[in-house]
Image: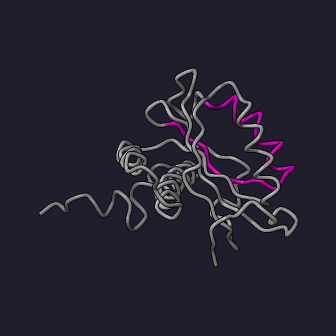
Amino acid sequence: MTTKLSIVGLADQGALAQLVYRSTSVTGVTSALEMSDILAEARPRNAQLGITGILTAVDGMFVQLIEGPVASIESLLIRLGQDRRHTDIEVVDRRLTDDRAFGDWDMVSPRFAPAELTALANLLSTGAPGLDDLIEVLSRALKRQEAVLEGRDRPLAQAVLGETGFLADRVEPDI
């Protein structure tokens, strides 16, 4: 069940909130690699506050989906407003929810494939995309990256040739 987040009176209820914002990067951050300092700083604090989420940059904008207790999210928004690495913070959407979309990550910043970056940029250009649409694009990028990393644990021949749905299915048989 999800409802729109109303700040008044909810912080004491221990409700779980999801919020996505975008902001303008002052330093021109454009990739996950360039955000490593931000992530290194955010992860311990987020873990302590029960905040999880995903952070990325696209077209000179930070895009971050955060989830956690309402009081923690509101506290984080205040800190973000004081952070000099970005300006023009705009909350795109927020809601109460029973479930986290990125509960395994105190903060993650996946590398995006070009099609995923295009999909995210298109969503953001529509004005105020909904959380579900953003979660879908962000989750798809994260799952693809996780699949790539899991493939590194296996010998190349097994990863490429031994699994249904992988390259073996895309190779034309010799006739």
Relative to residue 120, is residue 23 drawn left or right? Answer: right
Point out the residue furthest to the left here.
Answer: 175
Relative to residue 108, is residue 117 drawn left or right? Answer: left
Q: Nearer the viewer, residue 154 or 14?
A: 14
User: Can residue 112 be seen here?
Assistant: yes
Q: Nearer the viewer, residue 109 or 12?
A: 12
Q: Nearer the viewer, residue 2 or 28?
A: 2
Picture residue at 47% right of the left edge, 49% below the top: 156
- The stretch in magenta equals 35-57
What is the number of callouts on the image?
0
Q: Name above or below for residue 2 compared with residue 55.
A: below
Picture residue at 82% right of the left edge, 65% below the top: 9
Q: Position of residue 118 (x, y in %)?
A: 35, 45
Work out which quarter of the rendered image holds the C terminus and state it: bottom left
* Magenta span: chief secondary structure: helix
Relative to residue 20, is residue 116 drawn left or right? Answer: left
Q: Name above or below for residue 173 compared with residue 126.
A: below
Picture residue at 60% right of the left edge, 29% below the top: 87
- Residue 82 appears in which quarter of the rendering? top right
Work out which quarter of the rendered image holds the N terminus and state it: bottom right
Q: Position of residue 70 (x, y in %)?
A: 78, 59
Point out the residue furthest to the front here.
Answer: 8
Picture residue at 40% right of the left edge, 51% below the top: 123
User: Can residue 158 be seen here?
Assistant: no
The colour style of the image is one colour
Q: Nearer the viewer, residue 21 or 169?
A: 21
Point out the residue furthest to the bottom here.
Answer: 1
| Residue 129 magenta-highlighted | no
Q: Position of residue 39 (x, y in %)?
A: 70, 36
